[in-house]
């Protein structure tokens, strides 16, 4: 991409961000037991999000991710309206018959809203939300994790499958899926894989336009590790990195900080210094430090008792 063309595209993205209105990263706390344990329970949560979004049209939902014990949303709207949206989801989840055993823990969820201040910020938040599922499940990628809207981003095959296989829901099915009559007047409600598809209610195309192109998006979700740490710090979450992520951090530190190519070329003092950085700055486990730096488990345990 030529420099001038890139700058033009960046200006267009910035304009679209400014036109999007006030945006918030909405999240609930992680220190709650498992809420969603199987496919039917996750599908119930997906339908609750669809219900809240279609019921509150003043909230524009760009993307979201349902984890087994917490939620992430990126939405635009007035602060109180977006907060109502999050609280509505929590209340409807607590009312759902499939989730009755988790009702008490669901009601403990407290949504927090973090205002998005810039185009760079919204890109990082989108990437952070979409990376959540794959970070805890190594069999998933941002293009496969089902319980959210992330897999639709810059994914022509998934969008095509929705267009080809999505089925218009009739009134009885809408009521059965949402345990509500609220969607009786909504005509464009499509079901795929047993739940209302995010393609019906998420502003995915508009959110894609916050990126210059698919390549920039892919860089954000796959390589830009430091930005994910910044988002986690801002919202008070612990972020866990895969061995692949930490290996990139290790190799970068070896070259930048210690002037060597690989960890094997580090002296003992530098290895200990790097181990502390991984542990305290990147939440690396003892086993990860042992694997990545080739330090004996006993020595790692002495460093971090």
Image (cartoon, rainbow, N blue to C red):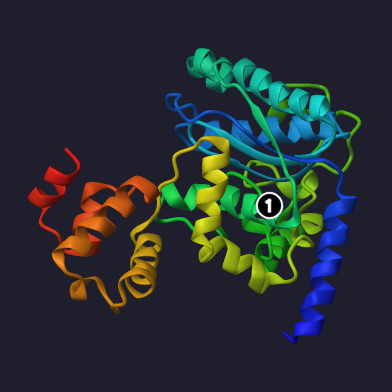
When the figure is inspected, residue 156 is found, relative to residue 64, above or below; the finding is below
Which quarter of the image is occupied by the C terminus? top left
Which residue does the image show at 88% across and 35% down from the upper left? Answer: 186
When the figure is inspected, residue 49 is found, relative to residue 258, above or below; the finding is above
Where residue 123 sits, quadrant-wise, is: bottom right
Q: Nearer the viewer, residue 85 or 38?
A: 85
When the figure is inspected, residue 139 is found, relative to residue 193, above or below; the finding is below
Image side of residue 215 versus residue 181, left or right:
left
Q: Nearer the viewer, residue 233 or 30?
A: 233
Q: Nearer the viewer, residue 282 or 68?
A: 282
Image side of residue 14 versus residue 268, left or right:
right
Which quarter of the image is occupied by the N terminus? bottom right
Task: State the residue lying farthest toward the bottom.
Answer: 2
Which residue does the image show at 61% across and 31% down from the upper left? Answer: 44
Residue holding disc 1: 121
> How many marks overall?
1
When the figure is inspected, residue 180 is found, relative to residue 74, above or below; the finding is above
Q: Where does residue 215 sit, x and y in percent of width and height?
A: 65, 73
Q: Where does residue 162 sit, x and y in percent of width and height?
A: 72, 57
Image side of residue 106 versus residue 216, left or right:
left
Q: Where does residue 74 sit, x and y in percent of width and height?
A: 70, 43
Q: Where does residue 31 sit, x and y in percent of width and height?
A: 44, 26
Which residue does the image show at 63% across and 15% down from the upper left? Answer: 95
Mark 1 surroundings: few (<14), some (14-19) or many (≥20) residues within 10 A: some
């Amino acid at each position: 991409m030529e420099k001038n063309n890139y700058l033009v595209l960046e200006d267009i993205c910035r304009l679209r961000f400014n036109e999007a209105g006030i945006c918030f990263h909405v999240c609930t706390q992680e220190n709650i037991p498992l809420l969603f344990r199987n496919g039917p329970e996750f599908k119930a949560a997906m339908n609750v999000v669809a219900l809240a979004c279609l019921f509150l049209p003043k909230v524009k939902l760009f993307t979201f991710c349902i984890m087994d014990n917490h939620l992430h949303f990126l939405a635009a709207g007035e602060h109180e309206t977006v907060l109502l949206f999050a609280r509505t989801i929590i209340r409807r989840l607590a009312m759902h018959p499939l989730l009755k055993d988790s009702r008490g823990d669901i009601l403990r969820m407290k949504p927090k809203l973090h205002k998005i201040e810039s185009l760079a910020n919204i890109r990082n938040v989108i990437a952070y939300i979409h990376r959540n599922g794959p970070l805890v499940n190594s069999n998933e990628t941002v293009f496969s994790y089902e319980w959210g809207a992330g897999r639709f981003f810059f994914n022509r095959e998934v969008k095509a499958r929705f267009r080809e296989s999505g089925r218009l829901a009739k009134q009885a099915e809408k009521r059965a899926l949402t345990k509500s009559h609220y969607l009786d007047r909504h005509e464009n409600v499509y079901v795929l894989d047993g739940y209302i598809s995010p393609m019906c209610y998420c502003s995915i195309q508009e959110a894609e336009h916050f990126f210059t192109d698919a390549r920039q998006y892919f860089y954000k979700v796959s390589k830009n590790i430091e930005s994910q740490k910044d988002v986690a710090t801002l919202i008070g979450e612990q972020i866990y990195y895969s061995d692949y992520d930490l290996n990139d951090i290790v190799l970068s530190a070896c070259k930048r900080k210690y002037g060597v190519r690989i960890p094997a070329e580090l002296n003992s003092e530098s290895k200990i210094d790097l181990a502390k950085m991984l542990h305290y700055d990147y939440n690396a486990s003892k086993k990860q430090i042992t694997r990545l730096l080739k330090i004996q488990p006993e020595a790692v345990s002495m460093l971090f008792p």
